[in-house]
Amino acid sequence: MLEITGVYSDGSTKDVSSSSTVTSSSTSILTVSGTTLSGVKAGTATITATDQGKTATATVTVVATTLQSISIQAVAPVPVGQTMNLVATGVFADAASRT
């Protein structure tokens, strides 16, 4: 998730993520939906956030990495007629993990 902070003339700050518009310079590399960034393929893209006529930019690098392992948290017994969500965690070649 992307967090966008506005800095006001009195020096105060405020999270303006929900009111900002965010775009990607290259949607073939990086897409944006609200404040969620999704890497499409390896490369670099610039994101631009706009709020109240002010803009900010940041460079985002998308890296290609491969899944090395996946695990599922211990599963408790599931009562008849009930459902249970599983949590799986993937570990990637760059040592990053994601659930």
Image: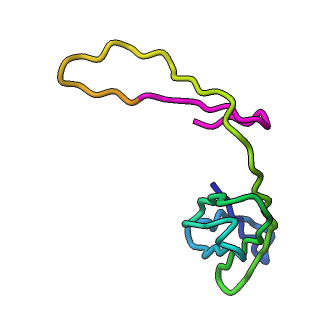
Picture quadrant where residue 44 is located: bottom right
Please identify the residue farthest to the bottom as the structure is shown: 53
- Of 35 and 69, nearer the camera is 69
Q: Is residue 77 magenta?
A: no
**What residue is drawn where x is 65% and y is 83%?**
52
User: Residue 65, percent across and down?
Assistant: 74, 44
- Quadrant where the C terminus lies? top right
Compared to 38, does 80 lie above or below? above
**What residue is drawn where x is 81% and y is 66%?**
59
- Of 59 and 71, nearer the camera is 71
- Of 53 and 82, nearer the camera is 82
**What residue is drawn where x is 60% and y is 76%?**
21
Specify whether 7 is left or right of 98.
Answer: right
Colouring mode (rainbow / by chain / secondary structure / one colour): rainbow
Compared to 63, does 51 lie above or below? below
Picture quadrant where residue 15 is located: bottom right
- Quadrant where the N terminus lies? bottom right
User: Residue 98, percent across and down?
Assistant: 63, 37
User: Residue 68, percent across and down?
Assistant: 69, 30
**What residue is drawn where x is 39% and y is 30%?**
85
**Count of numbered badges drawn on the protein:** 0
User: Residue 56, percent across and down?
Assistant: 77, 75
Q: Is residue 98 magenta?
A: yes
Compared to 98, does 37 lie above or below? below
Residue bounds of the magenta highlight: 86-99
